[in-house]
Image (tube, rainbow, N blue to C red):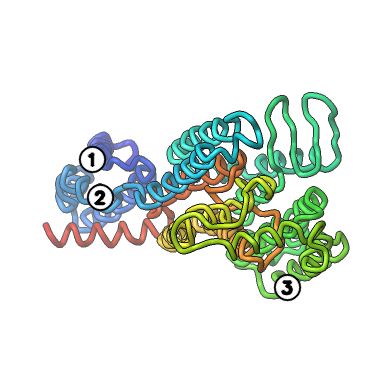
């Protein structure tokens, strides 16, 4: 029985969908309603009813289209996770507020003789808010379709940074890719774009096939080599990508041998490329060479020792620490506003990450779960690493999410939040799980009637 050609059935289904505001689930609802109505109609046909009678009985048993639609709309409400939005915007505003106070105190003016840093912070924050909105309204499932193209874009961008294929409009300098008048920090952007791509590529990946295993291994390891070559002195970004890569492989149901192989190759690349070895060496010998490799660590220690519980510390001039608004902004906040202010920043960031993890756990779609957890893992490592660095417990080079002055970081962080909200809004979408759940809900509705 082909219900798709029956006008009465299709009108009923369309009326049901008209009540469901979450348009993302319409396709799944249509598929399940067709299947359920066909199943019920066949039962009536076996009981001796004519086709038209069977269809009418099936519709009557389901209930009015408005009632069913209202129930399904309640089930599939797509309200955003407001706490995540509020906390992420608060953090960006906090960053702008801190830099504004630095400007008022004259610290920025004494260095730059202008409000350049403050102006750019406001600009990055505004663009970040736009990125959040864009992320919220892009159907995250469509990102998966373009995963291989996103991967290729990442390879091209990282290759341009590492090998400097172009000299002019596009050029690579260290870990920064210059495109016209804009700079992209590929040390941060690279790992994220690869994780977004691999979340889609590895979703339901067949690791049992030998050729697929080799292909999957290369897809994950080649970006790691580029990240290592682009950021030879920054261990943090290498670790961020490597750990997130292993998480995606694990979530793709790869066996322990494949996970072990990934880990072994990552460790081998770490030692062969000597990523971060110079930074680690400087960190180990930081107290023996306080004027060179240990300079920043020594200055951070002075800031910590000079900080008080509330209010401005003593015996330290922020101007003596280069770019105090960047990777060391946490120490600058603690020194300028007290340990209580630093604790508030840590609590806000930790709470935001915990909320995002809870979103990932609530998502039924395997791709959405991998995407959110992969990106959250990067933010989490970045957060912990930067705090440890500011406390003198880790090497530097990694910025604090949402807070540090960095256009690339703030814009991408806010876009990630948008994607998280996007995934949360469609958290019930997973074809197999949804059909089972919907079938159960239909039975409940019929029983209530």
Q: Give the left or right position of residue 23, taking residue 410 as reference.
A: left
Pointer 3 local density, CA inside 10 Å: few below 14, some 14–19, many at least 20: few
Q: Judge whether 298 appears above or below 259 on screen.
A: above
Pointer 2 local density, CA inside 10 Å: few below 14, some 14–19, many at least 20: many
Residue labelled with disc 3:
260
Q: Comparing marks 3 and 1, which lies closer to the viewer?
A: 3
Instruction: Tell me how far mark 2 sits from mark 3, CA to CA.
Output: 44 Å
Dot 2 falls on a residue whose secondary structure is helix
Dot 3 falls on a residue whose secondary structure is helix
Residue 421: x and y in percent read: 42, 48
Instruction: Tell me how far mark 1 sits from mark 2, CA to CA.
Output: 8 Å
Query: Which of the two labelled residues, at mark 1 and mark 2, occupies the earlier sequence position?
Result: 1
Q: Tell me, yes or no, whether the two marked residues, 3 and 1, touch with CB atoms within 8 Å.
A: no
Q: Judge whether 345 appears above or below 265 on screen.
A: above
Residue labelled with disc 2:
72
Pick the front one: 434 or 149 = 149
Residue 99: x and y in percent read: 53, 41
Residue 398: x and y in percent read: 66, 54
Image mark for residue 247: none
Residue 211: x and y in percent read: 77, 59
Q: Is residue 202 visible?
A: yes
Query: Which of the two labelled residues, at mark 2 and mark 3, occupies the earlier sequence position?
Result: 2
Query: Which of the two labelled residues, at mark 3 and mark 1, occupies the earlier sequence position?
Result: 1
Q: Comparing marks 2 and 3, which lies closer to the viewer?
A: 3
- Picture residue at 53% right of the left edge, 57% below the top: 313
Residue labelled with disc 1:
19
Q: Tell me, yes or no, whether the two marked residues, 1 and 2, touch with CB atoms within 8 Å.
A: yes
Q: Give the left or right position of residue 82, taking residue 311 as reference.
A: left
Pick the front one: 125 or 190 = 125
Q: Judge whether 391 appears above or below 322 on screen.
A: below
Could you say which quadrant of the image residue 65 lies in?
Answer: top left
């Amino acid at each position: 029985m082909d219900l798709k050609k029956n006008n009465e059935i299709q009108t009923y289904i369309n009326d049901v969908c008209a009540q469901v505001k979450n348009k993302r689930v319409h396709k799944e609802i249509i598929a399940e309603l067709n299947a359920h109505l066909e199943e019920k109609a066949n039962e009536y046909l076996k009981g001796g009813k004519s086709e038209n009678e069977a269809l009418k009985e099936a519709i009557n048993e389901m209930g009015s289209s408005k009632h069913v639609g209202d129930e399904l709309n309640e089930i599939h409400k797509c309200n955003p996770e407001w706490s995540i939005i509020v906390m992420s915007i608060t953090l960006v505003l906090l960053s702008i507020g801190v830099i504004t106070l630095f400007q008022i105190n004259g610290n920025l003016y004494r260095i730059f003789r202008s409000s350049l840093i403050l102006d750019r912070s406001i600009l990055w924050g505004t663009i970040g808010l736009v990125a959040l909105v864009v992320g919220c309204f892009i159907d995250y499932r469509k990102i998966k379709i373009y995963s291989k193209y996103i991967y290729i874009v990442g390879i091209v961008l990282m290759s341009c940074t590492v090998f400097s294929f172009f000299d002019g409009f596009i050029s690579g300098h260290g870990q920064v890719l210059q495109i016209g008048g804009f700079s992209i920090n590929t040390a941060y952007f690279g790992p994220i774009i690869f994780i977004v791509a691999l979340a889609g590529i590895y979703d339901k990946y067949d690791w049992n096939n030998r050729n697929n295993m080799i292909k999957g291994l290369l897809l994950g390891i080649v970006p790691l080599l580029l990240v290592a070559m682009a950021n030879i002195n920054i261990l943090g970004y290498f670790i961020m990508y490597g750990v997130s890569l292993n998480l995606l492989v694990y979530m793709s149901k790869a066996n322990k041998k494949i996970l072990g192989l990934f880990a072994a190759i990552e460790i081998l690349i770490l030692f062969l490329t000597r990523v971060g070895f110079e930074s680690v060496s400087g960190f180990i010998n930081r107290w023996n060479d306080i004027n060179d490799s240990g300079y920043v660590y020594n200055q951070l220690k002075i800031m910590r020792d000079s900080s008080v519980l509330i209010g401005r510390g003593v015996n330290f001039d922020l101007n003596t620490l280069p770019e105090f608004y960047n990777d060391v902004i946490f120490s600058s906040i603690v020194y300028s506003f007290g340990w209580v202010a630093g604790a508030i920043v840590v609590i806000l960031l930790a709470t935001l990450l915990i909320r995002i993890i809870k979103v990932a756990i609530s998502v039924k779609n395997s791709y959405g779960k991998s995407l959110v957890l992969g990106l959250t893992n990067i933010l989490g490592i970045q957060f912990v690493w930067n705090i440890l660095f500011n406390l003198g417990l880790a090497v530097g080079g990694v910025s604090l999410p949402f807070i540090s002055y960095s256009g690339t970081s703030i814009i991408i962080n806010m876009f990630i939040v948008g994607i998280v909200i996007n995934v949360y809004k469609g958290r019930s979408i997973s074809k197999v799980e949804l059909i089972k759940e919907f079938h159960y809900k239909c039975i409940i509705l019929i029983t209530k009637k």
